[in-house]
Amino acid sequence: ETGVTQSPTHLIKTRGQQVTLRCSSQSGHNTVSWYQQALGQGPQFIFQYYREEENGRGNFPPRFSGLQFPNYSSELNVNALELDDSALYLCASSLSPGTHNEQFFGPGTRLTVL
Amino acid sequence: SQKIEQNSEALNIQEGKTATLTCNYTNYSPAYLQWYRQDPGRGPVFLLLIRENEKEKRKERLKVTFDTTLKQSLFHITASQPADSATYLCALEDDRDDKIIFGKGTRLHILP
């Protein structure tokens, strides 16, 4: 059984560019959630995907979008990058939606926007 | 407004003592509360979940309490060890929209 993996590990972009982050969920998990974690803060929920459909969204603008594929892996896309988008982006997979389920987090992608 | 507050940004505890971390919340009525551990540069790792009808939950040296009247959860690590040094995050269910909300975390340092 493999854990949650994310790529790339680190990324540097400039303001206005677009970025795609990738996440492979743990085997058997059909739900992926994405979080943004600024330095010294807790993770902030971006959105969740369940069986290839968005299943809830936090207070993030539409330039944050996502996809989930038939194998339950997922992508997070951010358009028109802003300096404040610099953060650790975490994905977490779980057996199903529902806040009672344990979430398994990946190591994160550190995004720096210059 | 709705808030989750975790006690002090950092906590220093002598090895062997019990570390107690606090999570207070306002304007939520969560059915569940979770605790995670996060090491620098890593993703959070799930530790324990406690339901609103459970007063206490234990796992090895860890104990969590959940007081829905006080709107508070306490997280205890007994016989603390330097390897327990990490940031500990509490997370609860936002009952309005079934989303998980995380606190900022408490950095715990266990001093040898």
Image (cartoon, coloured by chain):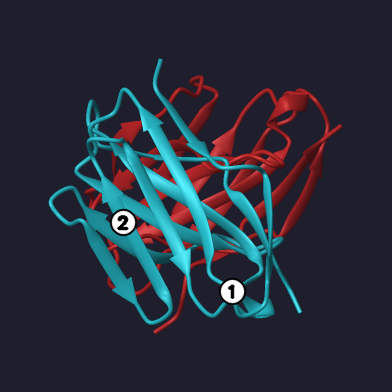
Chain colours: A red, B cyan
Disc 1 and disc 2: Cα gap in Å? 18 Å
Residue displayed at 28% across by 50% down: B66
- Where is residue A26 shown, x and y percent of the image? 39, 70
Residue density around tag 2, few if under 14, some if 14–19, many if 20 or more, within 10 Å: many
Whole-percent x and y of residue A107?
60, 63
The residue tagged 2 is: B65
Q: Residue furthest toward the right?
A: A114
Q: In which quarter of the image is the N terminus of chain A?
A: bottom left
Image position, residue B65 (x, y; %):
31, 56
> The residue tagged with tag 2: helix, strand or loop?
strand
The amino acid type of the residue labelled 1 equals: Lys
Question: Does label 2 lie on the same chain as label 1?
Answer: yes
The image quadrant of residue B61 is bottom left
In the image, B54 versus A23, the foreground residue is B54
Counting from the top left corner in percent of width and height, residue B64 is at: 35, 61
Q: Which residue bears the numbered disc 1?
A: B17
The part of the image, by quadrant, that contains residue B112 is bottom right
Instruction: Identify the residue shown where x is 55% and y is 23%.
Output: A63
Is residue B3 something that shows in the picture? yes
Marks 1/2 in contact by CB < 8 Å: the verdict is no
User: Quick one: which residue is furthest to the left in this view?
Assistant: B53
Task: Please give the name of the residue rendered at 58% of the width and 76% of the height, measured from the top-left corner.
Answer: B80
Chain at tag 2: B
Q: Nearer the viewer, residue A54 or B105?
A: B105
